[in-house]
């Protein structure tokens, strides 16, 4: 009887191991890993910070078979980082569309020694002052125009109360500055601020500028539809 039970256990373990080997855990996909483009499909580039990193994969899934959706291989950070790296990010391709944003890193407060996220109450200073932000966007747009058939600005998403070293209302001020630049260059805007503000308690984390997965998916639907609509023009 003992041998029979033992044999049953061993056999069960064998089939469990065999089954495990046949169904390996799916490999996690990094949204910043470069993609292999499909010939004949338009090439679209996303430039942005961690908010865009969060919705890159769901947007790509929605556009599968329709668009080669690329993104820069890093967090886009503030406009000062953009100015340093834009040539590398754009490469030598002629993009059909560039979907871009800078803002949440420009408006955050930093330590005078460069320490990240130091509140102004503790001596922090804004990383990129509003006037410099506007000038930097101007330079970035002039550069991107040389590499893209179309540009679309995604305005900066809201700041929930209590967010560390970022302050409610600053997204509005930086968006107003960006809007002046976009109007000057006749660049359309995809509004992600308004739906995010309306659904903040559901989509966004508490006292944090980042989104829950379902919030990122909600943004992805808007980004994907906007891309498809722009490419038809």
Image (cartoon, rainbow, N blue to C red):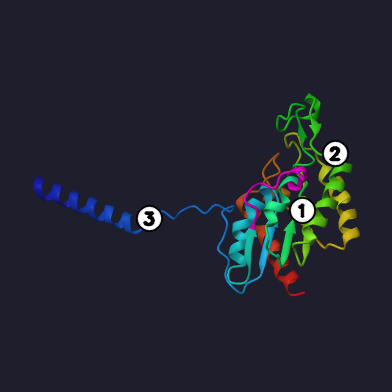
Check disc 1 and report its element: helix, strand or loop: helix
* Region of the chain picked out in magenta, as a range: 71-83
Count the marks.
3
Report the residue that reaches farthest toward the top.
122
The residue indicated by pointer 1 is 198
Q: Place residue 27 in its image quadrant.
A: bottom left
Q: Is residue 48 magenta?
A: no
Q: Place residue 190 in its image quadrant.
A: bottom right
**Which is nearer the N-term, disc 2 or disc 1?**
2
Q: CA distance from mark 2 to mark 3?
A: 49 Å
Contact between marks 3 and 1 (CB within 8 A): the answer is no
Q: Residue 88 in the image: state x and y as whole percent.
A: 68, 52
The residue indicated by pointer 2 is 129
Q: CA distance from mark 3 to mark 1?
A: 41 Å
In the image, residue 3 above or below residue 187:
above
The residue indicated by pointer 3 is 24
Q: Residue 60 in the image: state x and y as whole percent.
A: 61, 62
**Which is nearer the N-term, disc 3 or disc 1?**
3
């Amino acid at each position: 009887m003992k041998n029979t039970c033992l044999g049953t256990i061993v056999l069960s373990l064998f089939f469990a191991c065999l089954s495990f080997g046949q169904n390996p855990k799916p490999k996690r996909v990094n949204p910043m890993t470069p993609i292999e483009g499909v010939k004949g499909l338009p090439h679209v580039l996303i430039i942005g910070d961690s908010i865009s990193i969060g919705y890159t994969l769901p947007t790509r899934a929605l556009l599968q078979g329709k668009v080669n959706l690329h993104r820069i291989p890093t967090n886009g950070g503030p406009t000062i980082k953009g100015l340093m790296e834009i040539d590398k990010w754009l490469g030598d391709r002629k993009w059909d569309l560039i979907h871009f944003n800078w803002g949440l890193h420009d408006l955050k407060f930093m330590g005078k020694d460069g320490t990240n996220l130091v509140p102004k109450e503790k001596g922090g200073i804004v990383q990129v002052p509003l006037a410099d932000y506007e000038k930097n966007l101007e330079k970035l747009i002039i550069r991107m125009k040389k590499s893209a058939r179309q540009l679309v600005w995604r305005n900066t998403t809201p700041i929930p109360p209590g967010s560390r070293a970022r302050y409610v209302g600053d997204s509005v001020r930086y968006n107003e500055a960006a809007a002046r630049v976009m109007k000057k260059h006749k660049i359309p805007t995809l509004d992600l601020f308004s739906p995010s503000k309306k659904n903040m308690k559901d989509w966004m984390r508490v006292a944090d500028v980042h989104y829950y997965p379902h919030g990122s998916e909600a943004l992805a639907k808007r980004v994907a539809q906007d891309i498809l609509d722009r490419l038809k023009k």
